[in-house]
Image (cartoon, rainbow, N blue to C red):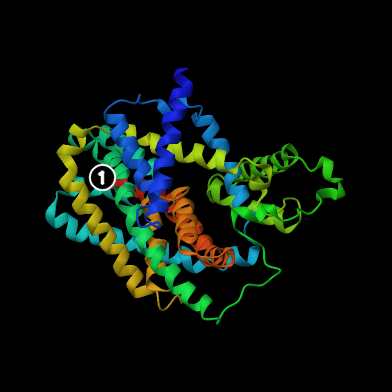
Amino acid sequence: MSFLLCFLAVMVFMLIGEWVSTASKAYIPSVFVSAVLFIIGFWTFIPKDVVVQASYSSQFVQICIALLLVHLGTLMNLKQLIAQWKAVAIALLGVCGTILITLTVGSMIFDWHTVIAAVPPLTGGLVAALLMTDGLKAAGITALVALPVSMFITHSLIGYPVTSAMLKKESQRLLKKFRGGSVKLDPNRQRMMQGASDAPAKRIFGLPDDYQTSAFILVRVAVVAVISLYVAQLMHGVINSFVICLIFGVIAHQFGFLEDNALNRAGVFSWLIYGLLAYVFSQLNLTTPAMLGQIIIQIVVLILLGILGMYLASLILAKPFGMSRPMAFACSLTALFGFPADYILTTEVCKNNAKTADEEEYLLENILPKMLVGGFATVSIASVIIASIFLKLI
């Protein structure tokens, strides 16, 4: 019974977030609302391990990540993926802007160790935060041990609404062009919308329709995921394993091994994305009101300086890279949360701003690939490298 109640609590928090986002036309992102509810819940009445009790264990989450990234590869083609090098460049240079502003201006306001401890989690995810926490413990700087994890928790809360606002601006700009008739969708295009799975699927290996089951789809997605992780091991982490899953998903789709929108066709996409999102929110149980109260000023000031660095870099780089300023800024802001929040925010904004299925499809095609690769470049790769460098500066 307790496990079912935990699952109910997790899904209620997700549901409230989605409803608030829909009612506000994505002005208030669902991930922001759900995150706030989880924080309040952890500080009051729900158990710290509510997500694990709801069946979303760390092992399940690792499966979610691999399968979902292979699936996202089936929404793109190689041309789309290669074309996103500009988004990668802007995202990484935005992180450089964050480091520059926080190290210069931040060091004038706070002591050196505070800034060094805060920057890696500010530019990435939980791995960077945990690396800095371990480094501070080893150096005996116990007063700042809570800062990296608290920074990781807080910066995403601020990043969600700011990114949503930028994506709404970009959506409005794109829709103006689309509704004006200056661009049109290719009728033979590969669709990215979840509903695209309603279209007839191609027969894989020429097998009859009765054999094209959900299990058959999951087996093939899992095969690609296993191969991706094996290749990542052979490369000794030179390229992040999650990035390889995405690339191999694209390749498997291009060669006809996987159909369009694979996990939606299998009927498991929503279950996996909710599980992964719940696990991300479970990290919010690592802090307490007392812990945040002691360092909230440092956190807020450094986050604002970091976002300012991203904004200035985006402002300078948008035009040379042929991107609008809101889109460039949104790519940089992926450093504050990464996958799956970048996917959720993008699909949410596109759905709530579009009036027709074609408009939604057009928005997704032009925004989602940029946000995904931007998030991988910053959170999955750059932040870990930055943390390893900054550990030597403590």
| Mark 1 neighbour class, 10 Å CA radius: few under 14, some 14 to 19, many 20 or more | many
- Specify the quadrant of the image occupied by residue 16: top left
For the C terminus, the quadrant is: top left
Q: Which residue is drawn at 81% across and 51% down?
A: 203
* Residue farthest left in this picture: 109
Nearest to the observer: residue 323 or residue 347: 347
- Residue 151 lies left or right of residue 243; in this view the side is left
Count of labels in the image: 1
> Which residue lies under the disc numbered 1?
117
Instruction: Work out whether residue 141 can be spotted.
Output: no
Is 323 drawn above or below residue 68 in the view shown? below
Q: Is mark 1 on a helix, strand or loop?
A: helix
Task: Give the residue drawn at x 24%, y 35%.
Answer: 145
Q: Where is residue 2 in the image (x, y as percent from the top left)?
A: 44, 18
> Which residue appears at 47% of the width and 65% of the height?
87
Q: In this view, does 168 lie to the left or right of 241?
A: left
Q: Residue 176: x, y in percent?
A: 46, 76
Q: Position of residue 286 (x, y in %)?
A: 31, 32
Q: Would residue 359 appear left or right of 298 to someone viewing this image? A: right
Q: Which of 390 and 261 is in front in this view?
A: 261
Depicted 389 relative to depicted 83: above or below: above
> Can the viewer see residue 77?
yes
Q: Mark 1 belongs to which amino acid?
A: Ala
